[in-house]
Amino acid sequence: MIALPEPVAALVGALGQLPGIGPRSAERLALHLVQSESGQVQQLAEALLTARDRIQLCETCGALTEHQPCALCTDDRRDAATLCVVETAVDIINVEKSGAFKGRYHVLGGKISPLNGVDPEDLRIAELEGRLTGINEIILALGTDVEGDATSNYLAQRFTGKGNQGVTVTRLAHGLPAGSGLEYADDLTLTRALEGRRELQ
Amino acid sequence: MIALPEPVAALVGALGQLPGIGPRSAERLALHLVQSESGQVQQLAEALLTARDRIQLCETCGALTEHQPCALCTDDRRDAATLCVVETAVDIINVEKSGAFKGRYHVLGGKISPLNGVDPEDLRIAELEGRLTGINEIILALGTDVEGDATSNYLAQRFTGKGNQGVTVTRLAHGLPAGSGLEYADDLTLTRALEGRRELQ
């Protein structure tokens, strides 16, 4: 058995470190790439380096941005009195895609997880506290797993009624996902959908 | 809704051209990469360029190689009288992983597919013909779909009995895959497994 040529093996190793790319996918991608047009590979390598060089995290909210502060933080049309708290910079992009939120953001950088050694002081919670002046509402848009729930509860306890006027802390609704039938909903989702039922008017 | 920062969007575009990477995966990878260690991204970009620069196809057999001719073609311990014919350079790597073949290779570069405009002269069949001197056996290791079968039949007709001594043309056995039960075998696989049954001794 021959090994892969060394440059290909190195590329497989580098690709295999990406999330969601297993050893087989990494090999398939590497073998595709070494047989691609040279220009296409060059373009990919340049896109990688350019993106990594030019993208940073906004020092105010933690969003991905090319400039400080980011476009979200400087856009006057956005409601500066409402903060949406998310786990990661990528979550901002998902909320923005929905088009349903027109306030500002705050990225925590994770969720509280004592088992993994993530305590409140490891997250950008002090920075959130520093932004409370003039804020009316904090919308918690964290994951719905145990750690997301724990983090939401922690933040609600810590921030409810804080700030100049007193801050309202809200959480995204839990319930049935759009476009899905009851048969696909697990017990916990159904329980939460029942608990959160709303009167039709 | 904000768009992705432009360098990220460019990276998503470049990644989305890779096989098996859909728009969602491309976005997830791009967002991971722009938040990764700068050194790790640099390493990936360099691995890409190095691999693409240094890897070429062997002019004799068509394998991926850093040198001409490739290590497979120059290895005296391999049986120079047996040629394994495969569709792509990557197939060589798969056969080599099995460790069950110790001869030389010939990459066709595809399979005959009139519907897709691939005729015999578009493949490396003339090059195969030019290598027949001293060859005892051609093992056809092509895919088992309609086009692979058609290509195997075409090559068998064209090459059987050719060469100095007369060449034997064989084909990989078709049958049950290893480690699988009958319940997973489709009708055609079972039919071929029955046709190809062998006496136990």
Image (cartoon, coloured by chain):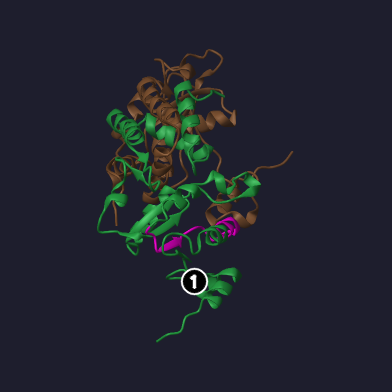
Chain colours: A green, B brown
| Residue A152 inside the magenta-drawn segment | no
Q: Is residue A140 above or below residue B69?
A: below
The reply, left or right, for residue B9 in relation to residue A23 is left
Which residue is at the front of the view, A113 or B23?
A113
x%, y% of residue A100? 34, 65
Task: Identify the residue at the far front of this view.
Answer: A164
Residue appearing at x 33%, y 31% in the figure = A41
The amino acid on which the numbered mark 1 sits, given as a three-letter code, is: Leu
Residue occupying the point 38% across, 32% down: A33
Measured as percent of width and height from the top left, residue A137 is found at: 41, 64
Position of residue B131 relative to residue A190, above or below, is above
The residue singled out by tag 1 in the image is A176
- Quadrant location of the C terminus of chain B? top right
- Magenta residues (range): A134-151
Q: Position of residue B196 (x, y in %)?
A: 59, 45
Q: Is residue A144 magenta?
A: yes
Q: Residue placed farthest to the right in the image?
A: B201
Query: Quadrant of the rendered structure where residue B55 is?
Result: top left
Chain ID at mark 1: A
Q: Is residue A114 visible?
A: yes
Which sits in the foreground, A108 or B62? A108
Crowding near the residue tagged with mark 1, few <14, some 14–19, many ≥20 C-alpha atoms within 10 Å: some
**The N terminus of chain B - image quarter:** bottom left
